[in-house]
Amino acid sequence: MRRGSHAGNALLVVHALAGEDLTECLVGFVVPKKVYARAVDRNRTKRRLRHLMRERVSMFPKNSIVVVRALPGLRDASFDDLEDALDDAMKRVLKKMVRS
């Protein structure tokens, strides 16, 4: 997560790195205990993010590594808010990837 591009908002941050020796795009999710103390809630959030990323992963180059990190503001957000925040962060990180 130290290299590459990143963009975020109050709910989450998307990190992306292109140019690795990969045949497909890899996506990972980080939901720390600061966001949700209970594992059940952290896993639910990861499932929601996986569901949203399935439709959007094709927007990234095939040789990309993408990490979506949840922030504490996500605790009170609805599914629609999560979807909007993910779309916003992804658009901005993709613009940064194209520029570099």
Image (cartoon, grey):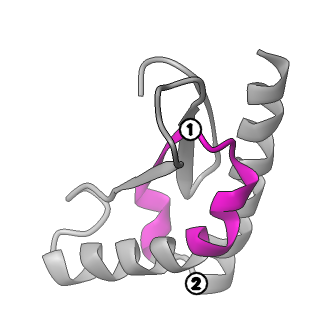
> Residue 92 lies in magenta, yes or no?
no
Residue at which label 2 appears? 78
Q: Quadrant of the N terminus?
A: top left
Which residue is depicted at the point 63% across and 60% down?
Answer: 57
In the image, residue 6 sits, relative to residue 39, either above or below, namely above
**In this picture, residue 68 sits left or right of residue 44:** right
Q: Marks 2 and 1, how far apart in space?
A: 28 Å
Q: Nearer the viewer, residue 10 or 21?
A: 21
**In this picture, residue 42 sits left or right of residue 97:** left
**Residue 82 at x, y percent in the picture:** 61, 72
Kindly indicate the quadrant of the structure image that contains residue 70. Answer: bottom left
Which residue is depicted at the point 83% across and 34% down?
Answer: 95
Which residue is depicted at the point 48% across and 66% down?
Answer: 74
Residue at which label 1 appears? 64
**In this picture, residue 2 sits left or right of residue 33:** right
- Which numbered disc flags the more N-terminal residue, 2 or 1? 1
Q: Amino acid at mark 2?
A: Ser
Which residue is depicted at the point 56% across and 45% down?
Answer: 14
In the image, residue 30 sits, relative to residue 38, either above or below, namely above
> Residue 56 lies in magenta, yes or no?
yes
Q: Which region shows up in magenta?
A: 53-75
Kindly indicate the quadrant of the structure image that contains residue 59. Answer: bottom right
Q: Nearer the viewer, residue 56 or 92?
A: 56
